[in-house]
Amino acid sequence: MKSSVYYMLMVCSIFCYAQEQKIDALEMDFNTIKVVSSEKLQIANQLSSLLQQTNPEKALKFSNQAISLAKTLQLKDKEAIAYKNKALNLVALSKDSLAIEAYNRAIAIQTERKDWNQVARINYNKGLIYFGQSDYIKANAQNVKALDVFKKEKDSFLMAVVLNSIGINQMYQSLYPEAIDSYLKASKIHEQTNTTNTDRYAGILTNIGLLYYRLEKNKEALKYFNKSLETNKKLNSKIGIANALTNIGNVYDDIKQPEKAINYYKESLAIMQSIHNKYGIASALTNTGIAYINLKEYDKALTYLKDTKVLFEELDNSNNLAIVYQSIGTAYFKSALQSENKKENYLKAKNNFENALKYSKKTQSIERQASALEKLGQVNAKLNNYKIAYTNQTEAKKLKDSFMSSEKKEEIAKLEAKYEYEKKEATLTAIHEKQQTLKEAEVSRYKFIKNTSMFVGSTLAIGLTIGFMLYKKKQEANAIAKETAFNLKVSNTELKALRAQMNPHFIFNSLNSIQSYIAKNDIENATNYLTKFSKLMRETLEKSTQKEITLTEDISILKTYLDIENKRANNSFTYNINIDETIDAENTLIPPMILQPFVENSIIHGLRKSTERGKICINYTKEKDMLICSVEDNGIGRAASAANTPNTNKHSLGMRITKSRIEIINKIKDTKGNLHIIDKPNGTKVEVKLPLTLAF
């Protein structure tokens, strides 16, 4: 039994010298402001968050000051943020019970405000505390609460995160059928949303591999570990690569290839040392010690294991302490045959197996308890304690039967078969639909265009109906509180943004292009164009209903839109999308399709009249606590475009809507986001500055 790596997906901030400078500047600003104000409150919350990793005690003082300021100013939303930051700081200080109290206070405030998304996120964070305490039942109770909310909001990203965490807690409880069901559901979400080239998907692959490893299905485990390694190498994720190497080494050690296992552990150890990951270092050292046991080099094994025991005691990790104690006991037990004083070694082995059992009970791991009892039975037999040995073995068998029964293995097999069947069924359905579409196109172009136009018309009609309903609600809300009127303005603005993004002009141009391909009997291009167009329609209609989506999801929509426009323009331009390396695109949230109107302007008004080959550059950078999103082209520029386009009302619509959205974001989050347009000698650059928002 070895030390394996599980992906809980806790998001940690990366601090550098620039952040230290930012912290110093914020502290100076905080001390300069002598009056109670929202600005001083905002700075206190920022410092409480930024200092969490480097100086949690100092961060805790700022979170308490933020709570006091928020109460004085009666700003409930800021008070909830302050309590959440306080909880995170208390966790960093290992004060879990106080952290839970702070989270509960934040939940009470957000429940009063009916902000269910924030309630769910806090519940998830509470679950992480219980996981750290090895209380997997309570951890999953919090996860289930969070999952219910994210399901209602159709937030696939957060659903996958929580399902993976649920699977980990179930696996630690030896609930293997339930765990694989959770993992496969999380995996399926990533496959359906085309987000498989991510560290979160790699983490799910790792966890499925670990489940098979626990069930002693080494071939299947190795397959998933190698998939995870391949994905992490594509992402250049050092910690992901190191974890995959450790897990692969575990499999080779189990199939009696300890020399090969040690080579993998050494690779993992080198990476963990380079990034100063204390847990990873301890894990690699533990596994190396276990491999040396299999090589019968017991003294060398004990050297590694005793060192790593100290590291896991510092980390207060009960699960891995159970593994280390059992491994030390095994080394003493096996070395007894070579020792002059066998009884002394057997007694040392017994003491370590008892410690292993104690920590296994603490973590509620049935599998580890069974293994420790089995070892105790063996050593008690050697010490002639036959009655105790029999009791140990009987208890071990009962526990092993509870999680390794044939019914449970059969249940897992059924779940796997169901998952594979659904994948194949989806593939066959897609092929059938494609063939049917081609057949209909060949039989009747007119019918195809008519049906598509009806669909678009229905969509627009629904949009107009919704607009009318929202307008009516706004009229009725005049007698209600100011906050309700403001929320309605947000909804109206988001609806306008949707209309601007998927305007009839673009839709009918796309349909004309499809008709043109069909007229030329260019079935391949017609099918390809229709596929991308359908994907863009689906993604836009799904994501535009959400207040925020991940940067990864937003970029996916932009790429689909750019590919469609470029194909319609006969590949007359190129584009590139750059993300600053300090930005975690999967954890960064952004208003959906905030840049789409400006990308459309670049193509239609900037590049279409240009004699040069068009270029569009989209950049995402971080400046302090703001996200800078920019669109830059080498087109004819705004002045020339205005001269060629007498009616500029539609041209400026996207800008007006985006300004309105930014104003609303500034009011909600008390930030200073803005929109800036720069006229270049050749082309135009648009910069949108937004508050940097993280999912966790």
Image: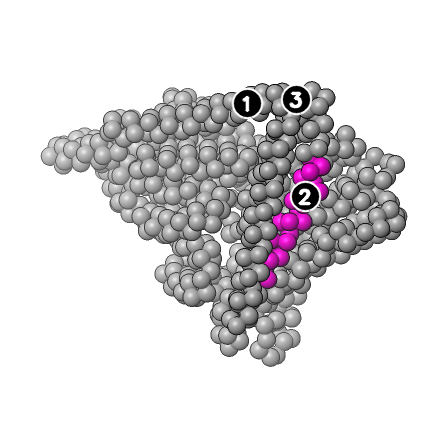
Residue 504 marker: 2
| Mark 1 → mark 3, Cα distance in angstroms | 14 Å
Could you say whether the residue bearing mark 2 is in a helix, strand or loop?
Answer: helix
Instruction: Assign the magenta stretch its main secondary structure.
Output: helix
Could you tell me residue 594's position as x and y percent? 66, 50
Which one is earlier in the sequence, the residue at label 3 or at label 2?
A: 2
- Magenta residues (range): 488-510
Which one is earlier in the sequence, the residue at label 1 or at label 2?
A: 1
Q: Verify whether residue 537 appears in magenta.
A: no
Q: In the image, what residue occupies the spot 71% across and 23% down?
A: 519
| Mark 1 → mark 2, Cα distance in angstroms | 26 Å
Q: In the image, what residue occupies the spot 16% across and 33% down?
A: 394
- Is disc 3 in contact with disc 2, using a CB cutoff of under 8 Å? no
Q: In the image, what residue occupies the spot 56% across and 48% down?
A: 462
Residue highlighted by disc 1: 436
Residue highlighted by disc 3: 524
